[in-house]
Image: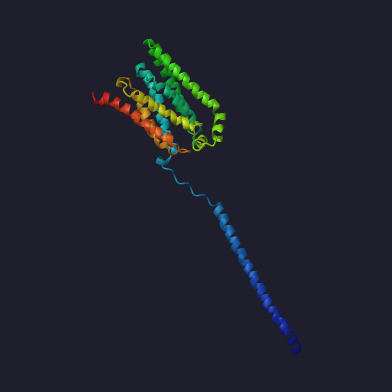
Amino acid sequence: MSLLRCRLGPLGRGRQPALALFRRRFASEAKDAAGAAGKDGVRAAGASAPAAPAPAVGWWHSAQFWGGMGALAGWGMTGSAIYDAQFHGPEVISLSMTPVMIVYSSLFARWAFVVKPQNLLLAACHASNVVAQCNQLRRAIEYKLSLGEEARVREMGVKAAAGAAVIGGLALARPVLQPAVVAMGIPGVSSFAAAPAGPFTVHFWAPMSKWLISGASFFDLNRPTDKISIAQYTALTLTGTFFTRYALLVVPVNYLLCSVNIALFASSGWHLGRKVKADYVDK
C-alpha cells in the first residue's frame, strides 16, 4: 500500500491544481454572466421607464401665443373694415392703403397655411380681411366716381393691373427661374435663391408686403386726421407689435418679418397717435 500510495501520490497532487483552476474559471464566468444580466436589467428598466415630460414653454417663448395674438390683431383689421363700412362714410377709405391691404392679406393667408407651426386661425383671418377690404375698395371707387374723379380711378386700376401681372408672371416662372438662378453659382445670389425663406417662397414675399403697408402709411403721412380710421390703425399697430416677437420664434426664423413689423408698428403708431391727439387731446 505504501508503494501504491507513493506511485499515486504525485498523480493525485497533480489533479488538485487543475480542479482549483477549473473552479476559479467557472466562478469568473458566472460572475461575468451575472454582471451582464444586471446591466441588461438596468437597460430594460430604463427603457420601460416613462420619459421625463418636456419643460413647459412660457408665453414669451411660445410661437403659438404670439401667433394667436397676431391672429387676433389680424381679425382686428377685418373688424375695423367692417366697422368702418357700417359706421363711417367712404371718405375715410384710403386708396393707397386698401389695395395694399388686399395684397398683404392674400399673401399672408398663404404664408400662415404653410409656416411651421401652421397657423390656420391667422390664415382664416387674412382670408376674411381680403373680402372686407375688397368691399371697402368698392365703396371708395364708387365714392370717387360720384365726385367725378374718373381719371384717378382709372390710374389706380392700371397700376393694380400691372402689379397683378408682375406677381402672376413671377409665380408662373418660379419652377423654371429658381433652379436656373441656383445653378448659376453666383456667390450670395444663388444661395439666397435656394434659401428656405428666399425670394422664391411666400416666406419672403409675405413680410415684404408689409413694407407696402408701411409705405402706404408714409405716403399718407399728411392725410387729414378726420380721414384717418382709428379702428384700422389700432389694428395695424397691434399687428406690428405682436408679429415683431412672433417672427423670432417661427421656423425658419424670419428676421425680415421682424424688421418689417417694427416699421409697421412705427408708421401705424404715428397715424394712430395723430388721430388720438386730434380727437381726444386737442379738443
Q: Is residue 34 visible?
A: yes
| 268 to 46, vertically: above or below | above
Residue 17 image offset from top left, x and y in percent? 67, 78
What residue is shown at x 49% (from left), y 24% (from top)?
A: 167
How many discs mark residues in the rendered view? 0
Q: Quadrant of the C terminus?
A: top left
In terms of depth relative to the viewer, which is nearer, 282 or 260? 260
Residue 194 image offset from top left, x and y in percent? 52, 36
Residue 15 found in image quarter: bottom right
Colour mode? Answer: rainbow
| 103 to 5, vertically: above or below | above
Q: Quadrant of the N terminus?
A: bottom right
In terms of depth relative to the viewer, which is nearer, 232 or 17? 232
What residue is shown at x 41% (from left), y 30% (from top)?
A: 72
Residue ranking furthest to the bottom: 2
What residue is shown at x 43% (from left), y 37% (from top)?
A: 255
Residue ranking furthest to the left: 283
Residue 88 image offset from top left, x and y in percent? 35, 18
Could you tell whether 153 is left or right of 33 in the image? left
Residue 235 image offset from top left, x and y in percent? 37, 28
Q: Is residue 142 visible?
A: no
In terms of depth relative to the viewer, which is nearer, 86 or 172? 172
